[in-house]
Image: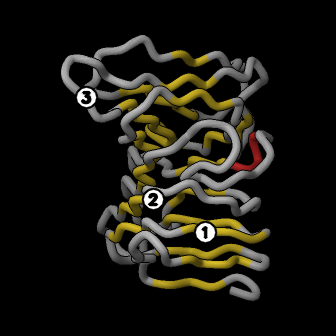
Amino acid sequence: IRSSETIGGLAGSIGTFAILDAGALTMRNANLTFSGIISGGGGITRTNFDATARVSTITNKNTYTGPTTITTNGVNFMGNRFDVYHLADGASSLGNAANDASNLVINTNTGAGGLRYLGFTDQATSRLFTIGSGTSAANIWADGTVIGTTAPKIEFTNPGAIAFAGAANSTQTLVLRGQAITDNLFAPQLTNN
């Protein structure tokens, strides 16, 4: 992709690749799985084009360095989501961008969308993120795959501040959730917006 492009969805098996030279690759329709490698200086966006929530599953470790955004079309506030298998620092399902809050934006307003971890191993990340406006704008699921009786944990280790998008003093809600019982960690500051 040479510059920003909007597509229905991104699908591919191990061995496939997508190179994002610049801009953002926006996925707005189908629920698909991509198991290849996404690289380059661009970013990716998950949104919707109608009143249906959309999910992109990203299973591999990607190296793209642009921002990752989970949002809505601005009319239908749906639970759009990235389901990911790798969150640790370095190459991850969300690429290899710097840990600045502007490089991961979760902004689904009242849609209850966000980021869902489904992987098999413990993951620690220093990645910060930006929360959008709305009563259920940002959700993070710790739903790692249980093997035997062990559930993998996720740790957000950076003690820096989470950023906020939208009007000052507006309602901006972060929901930490998941079905796996394990000792997850969330270290970032949640300051007044």
Provide the residue designation for mark 1.
38
Most extreme residue toward the front, as rendered? 15
The spot of residue 140 in percent (x, y) is: 46, 35
Distance between the Cα atoms at labels 3 and 2?
19 Å
State the image quarter where residue 153 is shown. Answer: top left
Question: Closer to the camera, 136 or 25?
Answer: 25
Q: Which residue appears at 45% of the width and 54% of the height?
A: 82
Q: Is residue 103 left or right of residue 44?
A: right
Residue type at mark 1: give it.
Ile
Residue type at mark 2: give it.
Ile
Question: Closer to the camera, 84 or 114?
Answer: 84
Q: Which residue appears at 68% of the width and 86% of the height?
A: 1
Q: Are marks 2 and 1 in contact (CB under 8 Å)?
A: yes
The quadrant the C terminus occupies is top right
State the image quarter where residue 58 is shown. Answer: bottom left
Provide the residue designation for mark 2.
58
Above or below, 26 relative to 71: below
Residue type at mark 3: give it.
Val
